[in-house]
């Protein structure tokens, strides 16, 4: 016999905003950050290591498009992070955050 479940929107919303849900999102973001730090390129010169040291994680209880769920964000604060990720006409793209999310985003 199949089980029947009746969900209430209010209850689902409360579940998506629970502190434990926010903690889990932050944990996953920290895993992605650690992978990103590990695979970040380091260049010789005056900015060497700045990109690798600029990874940050932030979380919030009300995030997403509708501000109705816990979210966590991984970002790099260096001014040239976009160029490292997507490349330029002279420098190939490294896709550090993309690769980190693919590897670290698994349920670990």
Image (cartoon, rainbow, N blue to C red):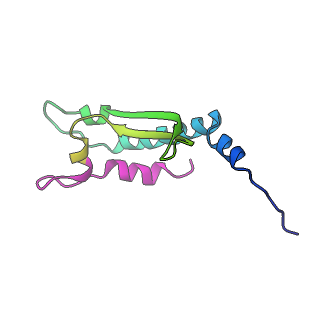
| Rendered location of residue 104, percent (x, y) | 47, 48
Residue 90 among those drawn in magenta:
yes
Q: In the image shown, does 54 or 25 lie closer to the viewer?
A: 25
Q: In the image shown, does 21 or 63 lie closer to the viewer?
A: 63
Is 28 left, or right, of 44 in this rendering?
right
- Quarter of the N terminus within the rendering: bottom right
Q: In the image shown, does 74 or 7 lie closer to the viewer?
A: 7
| Rendered location of residue 79, percent (x, y) | 22, 36
Q: Is residue 44 visible?
A: yes
Q: Is residue 2 above or below residue 43?
A: below
| Rendered location of residue 57, percent (x, y) | 43, 34
The residue lying at 67 percent from left, 40 percent from top is: 14
The residue lying at 84 percent from left, 63 percent from top is: 3
Is 4 left, or right, of 90 in this rendering?
right
Residue extending furthest right? 1
Q: Quadrant of residue 39?
A: top left
Residue 103 among those drawn in magenta:
yes
The residue lying at 78 percent from left, 56 percent from top is: 6
Q: In the image shown, does 3 or 36 lie closer to the viewer?
A: 3
Q: Is residue 34 visible?
A: no
The residue lying at 52 percent from left, 41 percent from top is: 67
- Extent of the magenta region: 85-108
Q: Quadrant of residue 23?
A: top right
Is 46 left, or right, of 96 in this rendering?
left
Is 14 left, or right, of 43 in this rendering?
right
Q: Quadrant of residue 93?
A: bottom left
């Amino acid at each position: 016999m199949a089980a029947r479940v009746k969900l209430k929107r209010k209850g689902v919303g409360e579940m998506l905003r629970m502190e434990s849900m926010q903690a889990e999102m932050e944990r996953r973001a920290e895993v992605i950050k650690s992978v990103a730090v590990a695979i970040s390129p380091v260049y010789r010169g005056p900015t060497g290591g700045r990109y690798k040291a600029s990874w940050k994680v932030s979380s919030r209880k009300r995030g997403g498009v509708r501000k109705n769920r816990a979210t966590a964000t991984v970002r790099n604060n260096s001014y040239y992070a976009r160029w490292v990720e997507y490349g330029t006409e002279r420098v190939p793209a490294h896709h550090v955050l993309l690769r980190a999310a693919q590897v670290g985003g698994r349920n670990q």
